Each structure stands twice: as C-alpha cells, then as structure tokens.
Amino acid sequence: MKIFMTGATGYIGGTIARRLLDDGHEIRGLVRDAEKGRKLAVFGVEPVMGGLDDAAILATEASRADAVVNTANSDHRGAIDAFLEALAGSNKPFLHTSGSSIVADDAHGDVASERIYDEETPFEPVPGKQARVDIDRMIRDARSRGVRSIVVCPTMIYGNGLGLARDSAQIPGLVNRAKASGVVRHVGKGLNIWSNVHVEDVADLYRLALAKAPAGAFYFAENGEASYRDICSAIARRLKLGEPQAWPFEDAARELGENSAAYTFGSNSRVRARRARSELGWQPKHGSATEWIEAELPL
C-alpha cells in the first residue's frame, strides 16, 4: 500500500512508520526541514517538502496515496479539511491521531477522578478541548462522504520511539526538568490519574486499524494507568533523587503554560480501549509505565 503520512519525523509517527515499512508499505512523509528530509529518506520514507498549511500539497498527496495517516497535529483544522475534501468518495483509509485529553478535567493535580471512559461513554469536554472533539467528530462523520475515516486516541505514551525521535512529551518533560533542578515535581498533589500506553503498542493498533477498521471508527489506546505522583516517584527512583514535590498550579502554569499545566500534567484522563480489543483484536504487550521508567528510561 502507498501511504502518505504527516508527522513521520516525530515520536508517534516515526514509530508507526517503522512498523508500516516493516510490513512492506511504501510511505511518503510530509517534512518542512531539508535536513530532516534527508534523514527521513535514509530511514526509508520518501520526503515531501511542505507543511500542514499547504492544502494543495496535502490534497495532491492524498489523491495519489492508497491511505493517509495524520500524526502531526490533532488540532489543525485546515489540514483535516484538505485531506477529507481530497479523499471524499474514494473510500480510502484516513487515520487521524487525537489524544485522550479530550476527556480531561480541571483537577489541577489535586483529585483522583473515579470517572472512566470507553469509546461509547458520552462526555462533555472542558472548553479548552472542545475544538479537538469537534474535529474528531467531523472526521468520523466523513464516512458519509465516502472516506474510511478512523480516529485513534492515545493516552499518555511512553517507551523509546523507533523513528527519528526517541522521546515522547510527558514523561521525558518531567525527567528533563528534574535533571535541571534536582527535584521531581508534579502539578498539585499529583493525585490525578492518566491511562498510558507503550508507543510500540500504539503502532500495532494503527497497523490493525489500517487493515480492518470500519469507517467512522474511534479507538482509545491504553494498557494501564498511574497517578502523576506514582509516575514522578518512579522517575525519582530512576534518577536517584528525593521524594517528588508538589508544584502549585499557578507556578506550573507560569513555566509550562496554562493549557499544558491544566490538561497535560494536571488533569485526570482515565479510559479503557474496549473497542480496539474487541473489534480489532488489539493485544498490547506492555502494561506498566512505572516499571518501564524504573527499568528502561534513558538516563
């Protein structure tokens, strides 16, 4: 299959690309930087120079490809519009990457929520995530336009990437700040819980979705969960630092930005990937982010 991919130089996209290349697919990948394009070519992906704002390039590549995989930006409405318009009536697969902060709350690290969502659970997003939810729904609705549109919604991703980018965002971000300051910090009390999933298991879910997911499908990707305090405690043990410390939300927001402090590090996001398991037969192999941190996290 000939696949056009955005985000192939990134952490998620690079790992998915590695798995798809191993399966024998041909991949063309969008890239803005010539040097990254050269590295991508060595990796096995044919570079296409351009960005998400280049609607004509996106439309042309989508028309030529057998499938499109978007891992570059969950919230870029213009790119999504360009892809869906080009793919309308083709019944080609369009796999889009969302993120489980769509079910985030305003815990600010101080509450462990008992709310757990699966793919069928109705929810009302916090205002900061409404636009992402709207995009996810628009993509799923594109099945009525003749697109085999699929949304994959990963939780906190951990593990070493298999592509050009090794590190994810959340856990390595905490690690880098701890190395710089000598202290591991969690927003608020760190009681908030996130589901998590290993990046290689995410890539396997994309492989299955590309092969057999029905149009309009939505899949969470998770296999385990942990509170931010437990994650930070594992990081502290790995780095041989003292006990994690509370980070007042206002201070975290000044350093991280309010959106990141509130939703990436301060919210609860607890989900279950029931549909991926039952409908696609997805069987993730890695089940503990804290064990990975203590045993395999690069120092």
Image (tube, helix red, strand yellow):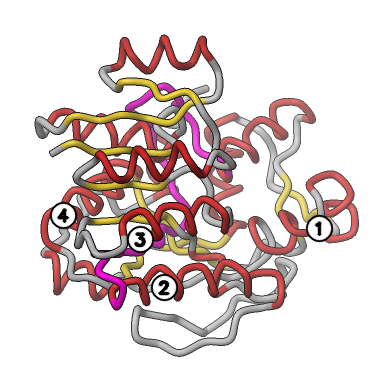
Task: Compare marks 1 and 3 and give the one earlier in the sequence.
Answer: 3
| Image-based side of 291 in relation to 112, left or right | left
- The mark found on residue 152 in the picture is 3
The residue drawn where x is 67% and y is 78% is 126
Is residue 265 within the magenta segment?
no
What residue does disc 2 label? 271
- Give the secondary structure at mark 2: loop
Q: Are marks 1 and 2 in contact (CB under 8 Å)?
A: no
x%, y% of residue 163? 36, 25
Task: Compare marks 4 and 3 and give the one earlier in the sequence.
Answer: 3
Tell me the CA gap for discs 1 and 3: 26 Å
Frontmost of labels 1 and 3 is: 3
- Give the secondary structure at mark 3: strand
| Kind of residue sitting beneath label 2 | Val
Q: Is residue 11 above or below residue 81?
A: above
Is residue 146 within the magenta segment?
yes
